[in-house]
Amino acid sequence: MPSVSRCVTITCRIGAGTLFLFVLIFLGLDSAKSETSPRVILEVINKHFTMGRKIPSVYLRVFSDGTAECHTVRYTGDEAETIKKEKLSQEELGKLEALIDTPGLLNIKKRYELMYTVVDSWMEWNIKVPHKGGAQKIQVLNFSPGSAREKKQPYPDALVKLGCSIWKLRHEVYGDEPYYLNDDCKEALELH
């Protein structure tokens, strides 16, 4: 008959082996899941500044699988949250990926101020574009290519194209931003 200490040793080895197997399976499933999860390639958080408050909302989020997601734009913070999603065509996704990787966009400033006087509220886009070397972050207050041009401080072409693309994608997914049809955007996006 085996001794008690020998039984404990065998039981511990079986338990350790089972635990080791469980950890391997768990890690394998977790890594397989993370490999298939789409990554964010563009995120725009809209902040509505009003009466000393900053009210954030997810304006646009685009994933590597072509899913575009938009949330309700919040003006008071009390709005019901509605999330809409659409799948971009391969052509649209390819154009967006090419745009966010252009050297012209990679070299723009990190912040663009208001281009006209505001009385009590304005919108700020916090744009985040993940790159291999780190995330590019751009802040644009009340994106307005026409106002920037009139003020003799035009935005770089790459920023106009990005901002107009953001408006266009927002309109296609959520249906509430027809601004991409202004003349500056029609030209930048070649929508003539």
Image: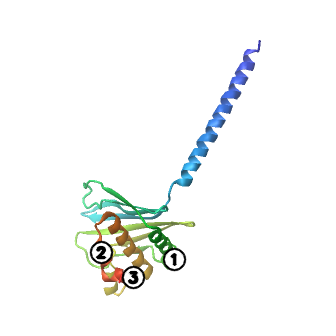
The residue under the point 45% across, 76% down is: 109
Q: Which percent across, then down, holds residue 67?
A: 43, 61
Q: Is residue 25 above or below residue 188?
A: above
Task: Give the colour scheme shown.
Answer: rainbow
Near-viewer residue (94 or 126) = 94
Q: Which percent across, then down, holds residue 159?
A: 42, 77
Number of marks present in the image shown: 3
Q: Mark 3 or mark 2, which is nearer the start of the sequence?
A: 2
Q: Which percent across, then down, holds residue 153?
A: 37, 85
Amino acid of disc 2: Tyr
**Could you tell me which secondary element the residue under label 2 belongs to?**
helix
The residue under the point 58% across, 49% down is: 32
Q: Is residue 148 above or below residue 11?
A: below
The residue under the point 72% across, 15% down is: 4
**Which of the labelled discs sits on residue 24, or is there none?**
none
Q: Mark 2 or mark 1, which is nearer the start of the sequence?
A: 1
Amino acid of disc 3: Glu
Task: Return the residue found at the far top.
Answer: 1
Give how far apart the Cα atoms at labels 1 and 2 are: 23 Å
Q: Is residue 126 above or below residue 162?
A: above
Residue, disc 1: 102
- Few, some or many residues within 10 Å of mark 1 (<14, 14–19, 20+): few
Residue, disc 2: 179
**Which of the labelled discs sits on residue 190, or is there none?**
3
Near-viewer residue (95 or 57) = 95
**Could you tell me which secondary element the residue under label 3 belongs to?**
loop
Q: Is residue 67 left or right of residue 116?
A: right
Q: Which percent across, then down, holds residue 174?
A: 32, 63
Quarter assignment of residue 150: bottom left
Q: Are marks 2 and 3 in contact (CB under 8 Å)?
A: no
Q: Mark 3 or mark 1, which is nearer the start of the sequence?
A: 1
